C-alpha cells in the first residue's frame, strides 16, 4: 500500500475551496442588491452567510493539514510515481530492521584475535604471557575464586534489568534476545573449534583447551550487548559493562586458568561476534520476516502541474 503527498494535489484542493467561497460571497452580494426578493431576502442571506462560515472553517482546517502533510491513497498515481527514479530517495526502516555495516567496529577485535594467534607461535609474545603468569601465580600463590563463572553474564543481565526498570534500550524484548542468542552462537561457533585445534595446555596443567578463553569471550559478548543497547542512552553503561568483562579476563589469569593471550583473543571473539550479530540480525529479519520490516521511502516526484515529495509506506 502506498501513500502519496504531491504539491499539485494541494493546489487543486485549495483552488476548489477558494472558488466555493467566492461563489457564496458573490451570491450573497446579489441577494443584498436585489430589491425583488422581499422578506425572503433576509432568510436567504442568513443561509448563505452560514454557508460562507462553514466553508471558511474548512479552508482553515485545510491550511493546518497543509502544514502537517496531506496524504491520500494513491491508485494510478502511485504507479506513476514508482516509475520515477529512486536515485535521490531516502529509505527508512523501523528499529531492528536495518544496521549499516561498519568495518571500523571490527578493527580492535580483529587485532586482539590476531595478537592471540601470533602469541601461539611467537616466542617473545609467549614469553610475555608466561611472565605475567609467573608474577600472578608462581610468585604470589593464592586461593582461586569462582565469581568469574557468574560475573561473565552480568552485563547481559543488566540489559534486561534496566528495561524492567523502565530504562529502554535500542531494541524490544524479542529483537534483543535474538541478537544476544545469535551473538553467543557465533562466538561458540568460533571458540569451541579453535580450542580443539590449538590444543594449548592451560597454565595449571588441567586440560588442553586454553586458547582462547571462553569465559572472557562470553563476558565481552555481554559487555558489547550492553554497550550497543544503551550507547544512545548513556556511554557509561557500556563503560561499566566493559570494566566487568575486563575483570572476568583478569580473574581467568588470577585463577591460573588462562594465559594472557588467551584472554586477549577471547575478548576479541566476544566483541566481534556481537557486532556481527547486530549487523546480521536485521538482514535476516528483513529476509525471512519482511512484513515486520515495512519500510518507508521519501522520493522526489515531478507531475504535470508541479513538484513534490512522495511518501511511500511498504506493508
Image: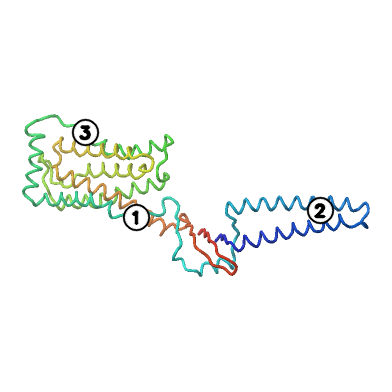
Report x, y in % for residue 311: 52, 59
Comes first in the chain, label 3 or label 2: 2
171 sits left or right of 310 in the view? left
Is 307 on the left or on the right of 13, as rendered?
left
In the image, residue 307 above or below residue 95: below
State the quadrant of the N terminus. Answer: bottom right
> For the residues carrying marks 3 and 2, which lies nearer the camera in this image?
2
The correct choice, above or below, for 285 with respect to 267 in the image is below
Instruction: Name the residue tied to disc 1.
Output: 280
Q: Residues within 10 Å of mark 2 (few under 14, many from 20)?
A: some
Q: Quadrant of residue 219?
A: top left
State yes or no: discs 2 and 1 in contact (Cβ < 8 Å). no
Extreme residue toward the front, this view? 33
Q: Residue at x 82, y 58 (%)?
A: 27
Left/right placement of residue 51 relative to residue 172 reads right
> Which residue is the site of mark 3?
146
Query: Mark 2: which secondary structure?
Result: helix
Secondary structure of the residue carrying numbered label 3: loop
The crowd level at tag 1 (other Cα within 10 Å; few <14, some 14-19, many 20+) is: some
The quarter of the displayed image where residue 202 is located: top left
- 113 to 241, vertically: above or below: below
Amino acid at each position: 500500500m502506498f501513500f502519496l503527498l504531491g504539491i499539485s494535489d494541494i493546489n487543486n484542493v485549495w483552488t476548489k475551496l477558494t472558488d466555493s467561497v467566492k461563489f457564496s460571497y458573490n451570491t450573497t452580494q446579489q441577494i443584498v442588491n436585489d430589491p425583488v426578493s422581499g422578506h425572503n431576502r433576509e432568510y436567504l442571506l442568513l443561509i448563505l452567510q452560514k454557508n460562507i462560515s462553514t466553508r471558511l472553517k474548512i479552508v482553515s482546517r485545510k491550511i493546518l493539514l497543509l502544514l502537517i502533510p496531506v496524504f491520500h491513497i494513491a491508485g494510478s498515481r502511485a504507479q506513476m510515481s514508482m516509475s520515477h527514479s529512486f536515485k535521490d530517495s531516502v529509505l527508512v526502516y523501523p528499529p531492528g530492521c536495518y544496521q549499516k555495516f561498519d568495518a571500523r567496529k571490527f578493527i580492535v577485535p580483529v587485532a586482539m584475535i590476531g595478537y592471540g594467534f601470533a602469541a601461539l607461535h611467537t616466542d617473545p609474545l609467549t614469553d610475555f604471557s608466561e611472565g605475567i603468569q609467573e608474577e600472578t601465580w608462581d610468585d604470589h600463590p593464592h586461593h582461586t575464586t569462582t565469581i568469574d563463572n557468574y560475573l561473565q553474564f552480568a552485563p547481559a543481565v543488566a540489559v534486561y534489568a534496566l528495561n524492567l526498570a523502565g530504562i529502554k534500550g535500542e531494541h524490544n524484548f524479542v529483537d534483543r534476545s535474538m541478537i544476544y542468542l545469535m551473538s553467543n552462537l557465533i562466538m561458540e561457533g568460533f571458540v569451541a573449534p579453535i580450542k580443539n585445534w590449538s590444543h594449548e595446555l592451560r597454565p595449571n596443567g588441567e586440560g588442553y583447551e586454553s586458547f582462547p578463553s571462553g569465559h572472557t569471550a562470553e563476558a565481552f559478548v555481554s559487555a558489547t550487548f550492553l554497550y550497543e543497547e544503551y550507547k544512545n542512552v548513556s556511554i557509561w553503561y557500556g563503560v561499566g559493562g566493559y570494566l566487568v568483562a575486563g575483570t572476568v579476563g583478569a580473574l581467568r589469569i588470577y585463577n591460573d586458568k588462562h594465559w594472557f593471550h588467551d584472554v586477549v583473543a577471547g575478548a576479541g571473539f566476544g566483541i566481534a561476534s556481537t557486532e556481527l550479530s547486530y549487523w546480521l540480525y536485521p538482514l535476516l529479519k528483513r529476509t525471512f520476516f519482511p512484513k515486520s520490516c515495512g519500510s518507508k521511502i521519501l522520493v522526489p516526484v515531478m507531475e504535470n502541474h508541479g513538484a513534490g515529495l512522495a511518501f511511500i509506506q511498504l506493508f
